[in-house]
Image (cartoon, grey):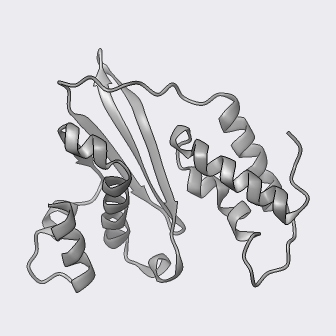
Amino acid sequence: MRSPSTVKEVQQLAGRMASLSRFLSKAADKALPLFQCLRKNDRFTWTIECEEAFLELKKSLASPPILMKPWPSTPLLVYISASDRAVSAVLVQEQEGTQVPVYFASRVLQGVETRYQKIEKLALAILVTARKLRHYFQSYEVIVRTDHLIRQVLQKPDLAEMMMKWSIELS
């Protein structure tokens, strides 16, 4: 596959990446330069960052991880992460002593979301994952894993209005 040279080709590539994102870890982070060159207020320019992102995505798609169908009686684990530019999660299940991926989810942060504090970004990652993978959350026991104490934060009564809404939606 050759590098895109027009806006239309980048749009087609972005659409393909969106449909294949469940197979790619941190797909939003990897594809961000491609999305940025599509902004309406900017002229289209294929930069070095776009080419590097394109090559990394090609490499990732050449050997995607094998996603497994979850076993009904075993709980699922969600590992979430948040960067300055995107939030992502991986849904895994422990099968025969190893954790195997079931689904990858990620989303680019937009507008004011880029200025959220780290804990707010992690809460947003949980919310995005819960919305996207609702059928898994309703059918399986799901355990969320992160490196922050997000449970205590979401249970505080003095949360900001936005975090309170998220907490209610997640409960």
Residue at image position (45%, 49%) is 105
Residue at the limit of the structure toward the left, as seen here: 157
Q: Residue at x 37, y 60 (%)?
A: 128
Q: Give left or right: position of 61 versus 171.
A: right
* Residue 62 position within the rendered picture, expressed as x and y whole percent measured from the top left: 70, 30
Q: Is residue 97 left or right of residue 114?
A: left
**Where residue 51 sits: x, y (%)?**
82, 54
Q: How many marks?
A: 0
Q: What residue lies at 72% left-to-right and 36% top-to-bottom?
A: 59
Quarter holding residue 165 = bottom left
Q: Nearer the viewer, residue 148 or 108?
A: 108
Q: Is residue 83 left or right of 94 when viewed as pictured?
A: right
Q: Quadrant of residue 46?
A: bottom right
The x, y position of residue 106, in whole percent, is: 48, 54
Q: Nearer the viewer, residue 12 or 155?
A: 12
Please tell me whether residue 11 is drawn above or below residue 40 in the rendered image: above
Furthest-top residue in view?
Answer: 96
Location of residue 166 with respect to 134 vertically, above or below: below
Whether residue 152 sits left or right of residue 93 in the image: it is: left
Q: Nearer the viewer, residue 154 or 16?
A: 16
Residue 56: % across, % down: 72, 44
Answer with the quarter of the image where residue 7 lies: bottom right
Q: Quadrant of the C terminus?
A: bottom left
Residue at (47, 83) in percent of width and height: 112
Query: Foreground residue, 126 or 79?
Result: 126
Point out the image quarter for the N terminus: top right
